[in-house]
Image (cartoon, grey):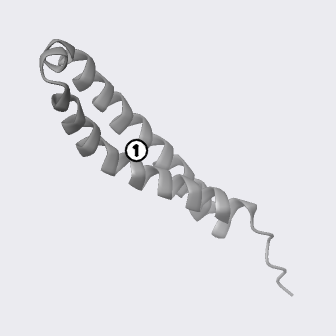
Amino acid sequence: MKRLFGGLLLAAGILIMACSGLCSLVVVVSGFEVAIREPSAILLPLIIGGVPFAIGFGAFTWGRWLLRQPDDEEI
């Protein structure tokens, strides 16, 4: 059960990081012209997209940690 939960966390973390990272990248690239005139405008999508990215990274790390734990021996 621990391996299943670890795999689910790993997959969910990868998906969350990919989606929030790609969304932030699209917003930054589309607003590049505005960012040249106003450099502080580039921080907003990075802050808003950074929170889900951090949550996804935490889920990924937790899932990887669970998968690396030794299996419990059941007698």
Residue drawn where x is 16% and y is 30% of the image? 41
* 74 to the left or right of 8: right
Does residue 74 sit above or below 22 in this rendering? below
Residue situated furthest top in the rendering: 33
User: Which residue is painted at 41% across and 51% down in the image?
Assistant: 54
Residue 53 location (% of width, % of height) = 39, 46
The x, y position of residue 4, in whole percent, is 62, 61
Look at the picture and state if 16 lies above or below 62.
above
Helix, strand or loop status at disc 1 = helix
x, y percent for residue 32:
21, 15
The correct choice, above or below, for 18 with respect to 59 in the image is above
Quadrant of the snapshot with the N terminus? bottom right
Q: Does 26 sit left or right of 1 as displayed? A: left
Q: Nearer the viewer, residue 42 or 61?
A: 42
In screen coordinates, is 55 left or right of 69? left
Q: Neighbour class for label 1 at 10 Å: few (<14), some, many (≥20)?
A: some
Residue occupied by mark 1: 16
Q: Quadrant of residue 22?
A: top left
Amino acid, disc 1: Ile
Q: Quadrant of the C terminus?
A: bottom right
At x 49%, y 57%, the residue is 59
Q: Position of residue 44 (x, y in %)?
A: 19, 38
Instruction: Give the residue at x 66% y 65%.
Output: 66
In this figure, what is the number of numbered marks?
Answer: 1
Query: With respect to residue 51, does 15 lie above or below?
Result: above
Q: Which residue, as the protein is rendered here, is positioned at the far bottom?
A: 75
Task: Judge by depth and name the residue closer to the eye, 70 or 4.
Answer: 70
In terms of image quadrants, where is residue 38?
top left
